[in-house]
Amino acid sequence: MSSVVIQFKERAKGNVTTPMVLWALAMTVILFVEVVSPSSSVITSGFVVSAILGIYLGWSRRVAAVIIAPFVSWLFAWFPLEVACMIHFGILKGFLVGLLTITFGWVGIGFVEALWIGMVATVVRWIRGGPRSPDVVIIDPERDLS
């Protein structure tokens, strides 16, 4: 008895690590500047940078990466936000406010990030079009090709 096992594995095309790390670094700088000296132009630039990441994720059909984007941003921004709060509010008060901001405030920040990037990525994915044609063509061995 002869048996053949063929294993198909689908791998995601396109890497999102570099764009997401660049976005997280940009958001770290934006959030740091916002805490130290608040302004509306800094918030606007945060939305623009996040929209750019959303466009990339939607175009490369990696919308599911939106789920981990706030966590990546939190990992990069944790220490700089603590320092920014200590600069803005003073050492002791800034340390405590920073811990509260980073711990509880990040739920709101992460939600807004995920929601905005997800909306942009979904719209771009929708505009780009439906699923691609399959990369594999299966020809029936019983079919006569002549």
Image (cartoon, rainbow, N blue to C red):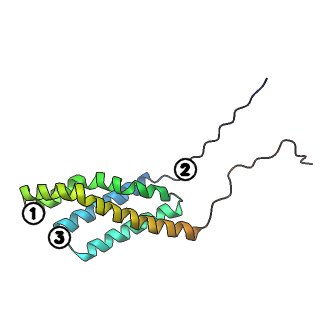
Which residue in the rendered view is the most extreme toward the bottom? 40
Q: Earlier in the sequence, mark 1 or mark 3?
A: 3
Where disc 2 sits, the SS reads loop
Task: Judge from the rendering whether residue 146 lies leftward or rightward of residue 97; answer left or right.
Answer: right
Q: Visible in this render: residue 33?
A: yes
Which quadrant does the N terminus fall into? top right
Residue topped by disc 3? 37
| Residue 13 image position (x, y, % from top left) | 55, 52
Q: Residue at position x 39%, y 62% from top? A: 114
Residue 90: image quadrant is: bottom left
| Residue 135 image position (x, y, % from top left) | 67, 51
Task: Judge from the rendering whether residue 141 lies leftward or rightward of residue 119; answer left or right.
Answer: right
Residue topped by disc 1? 89
Gap in Å between the C-alphas at discs 2 and 1? 45 Å
Q: Where 6 sits versus 40, above or below? A: above
Residue 19: image quadrant is: bottom left
Residue topped by disc 2? 12
Q: Residue at position x 34%, y 62% from top? A: 111
Residue 102: image quadrant is: bottom left
Label 2 CA crowd tier, 10 Å (few <14, some 14–19, many 20+):
few
| Residue 67 image position (x, y, % from top left) | 42, 56
Q: Visible in this render: residue 27?
A: no
Label 3 CA crowd tier, 10 Å (few <14, some 14–19, many 20+):
few
What residue type is disc 1 on?
Answer: Phe
Where disc 3 sits, the SS reads loop
Q: Earlier in the sequence, mark 2 or mark 3?
A: 2
Q: Where 15 sits versus 125, above or below? A: above
Identify which residue, 95 or 111, lies in the foreground. 111
Labelled disc at residue 16:
none
